[in-house]
Amino acid sequence: MEQNSSNFIKSIIKEDLESGKRNYVMTRFPPEPNGYLHIGHAKSIVINFGLADEFNGKTNLRFDDTNPLKEDQEYVDSIKEDVRWLGYEWDGMFFASDYFDEMYNRAVLLIKKGKAYVDDLSAEEMREYRGTLTEPGKESPYRNRTVEENLDLFERMRKGEFDNGAKVLRAKIDMSSPNLNLRDPVIYRISHATHHNTGDKWCIYPMYDFAHPLGDAIEGVTHSLCTTEFEDHRPLYNWVIQECETENKPEQTEFGRLNITNTVMSKRKLKQLVDEGFVDGWDDPRMPTLSGLRRKGYTPEAIREFVKETGVSKGSGTADAAMLEHFVREDLKLKAPRTMGILRPLKVVITNYPEDQVEWLDAEINPEVPEMGIRQIPFSREIYIEQDDFMENPPKKYFRLFPGNEVRLKHAYFIKCEEVIKDEAGNIIELRCTYDPETKSGTGFTGRKVKGTLHWVDAKHAVPAEFRLYEPLILDADTEGTELEDSEEKTFLDYVNPNSLQVIQGFIEPNMADVQAHDKFQFFRHGYFNVDPKHSTKEKSVFNLIVSLKSSFKL
């Protein structure tokens, strides 16, 4: 995982290689293309690709596309883009549907061995027959059909002779097993639906628990790594590998999933947020999808470091969202140019500054990275400051601008507020100030000190911009990362923050007039911002707030 620290999966792989049990390492990242990848998937990507790289192995990208009703090429394309954006390249790209012929043949093999049968029970009847955690299940009345009858019915299922739900193929294992997954699980069902990859060739489709181990075996996967919710499925995984007589014998190992505070990561719920218009798409910057985080301005380096810091263990913990933001700040502070932007403008007229004069002030692009160089900022008689940086009747220890007070303008001069101009409704619309030409930044002026420093933008050269400020999409709740369960009283939508997005209009420095999508900046005193690739135009750039400057998180 791009690091030297150990984890239990790494120890298993190392032991397998040293003992001769394995002579190579092959992993896979196997998403179902029924939605966009989210931050939780990043952990699986980093683990699978990272461990294979560490042991000079290979990783396949495989789409487990066994449900044509929920899958789409749009999701396939987005997943490929996200994996590459995170910094990984697969050795082979496959679809479970590439192996449908082979899977069908293996199902026929199970029937011939007396290990599978065609069942006519309805889904509801099957649930009744299944039993409970404390009571064994009952055998289906169709369980003892002959091999010949099962082969005939399964072939007729394949030919499309039966309606959806009329029949299924079930593995014949043990209806009294304490593991409910082994109580004759369904391994094939009828679905008269067009598949995104195979078209109308098939009207029966393998279930995930049957297709997944076979896909691993066919591709030569050695270590099938998945999250702990599949731990109870491992005996079925092993049964399929054994009874289908595959040449390669992959082994499943589970790790704890990545949960984040105030973050919903259920694909079903994320899709509901999209479909019902709570967000403007899967890539909305408020979404925990990788495409949403990318559009917001998160970097792949920060996400990888965050995932590595959360570690690899059997337990599923919940990481603080502030921890992820910490790694974003740490990555951006050495990359993002510094600049000034005014989000809520208040005009200031410097009455003793020459009316037609413009001077260009020097400022470091990033003080922490001197080699980034110098930018030039225009300064003239009229500027904009933040509305929040002025108070007409300030409380004690307010060090910004108020009548009679003096502050420093970042990179420029001291100014003093002399007059407040209001409209007929009593709203402050303009300040009139004076400046001291002896106080220019960089001249070594030591005559007196001021306690407040304000950022600003020159009004004559200011470039209009839109700023989008984000708060968590999900309000405080005991989410455990994903499981905001719906009840009669509430659904997870009741936790959606109605104030998660604030759109405001302001100004930026003129040297930012030609910014490009995904350019990132640190706006003095505001935070880190990313140029939105979806809503920015040639006429006006839109900046998404990535993270604020300050963090309370401690590693």
Image: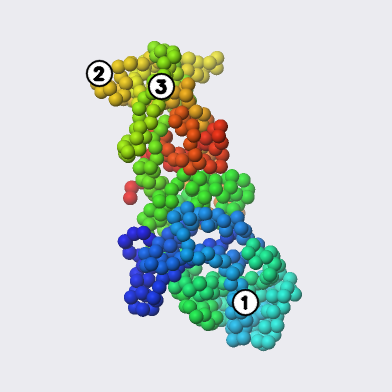
Identify which residue, 78 or 259, lies in the foreground: 78
Name the amino acid type tagged 1.
Answer: Tyr
Would you say residue 115 is visible in this rendering? yes
- The residue identified by callout 3 is 379
Name the residue: 30% across, 19% down: 439
Identify which residue, 460 or 291, lies in the foreground: 460
Name the residue: 42% across, 26% down: 456
**Is the residue under label 1 in contact with that under label 3 (CB below 8 Å)?**
no
- The residue identified by callout 2 is 447
Per the image, label 2 sits on a secondary structure element best described as: loop
In the rendered view, tell whether residue 5 sits above or below residue 535. below
Tag 3 or tag 2, which sits nearer the N-term?
3
Q: Which mark is residue 104?
A: 1
Crowding near the residue tagged with mark 3, few <14, some 14–19, many ≥20 C-alpha atoms within 10 Å = many
Name the amino acid type tagged 2.
Answer: Gly
In the rendered view, tell whether residue 520 sits above or below residue 426. below
Per the image, label 1 sits on a secondary structure element best described as: helix
Q: Distance from label 2 to label 1 (Cα)? A: 86 Å
In the rendered view, tell whether residue 324 sits above or below residue 380. below
Task: Give percent across and percent down for residue 138.
Answer: 61, 80
Per the image, label 3 sits on a secondary structure element best described as: strand
Tag 1 or tag 3, which sits nearer the N-term?
1
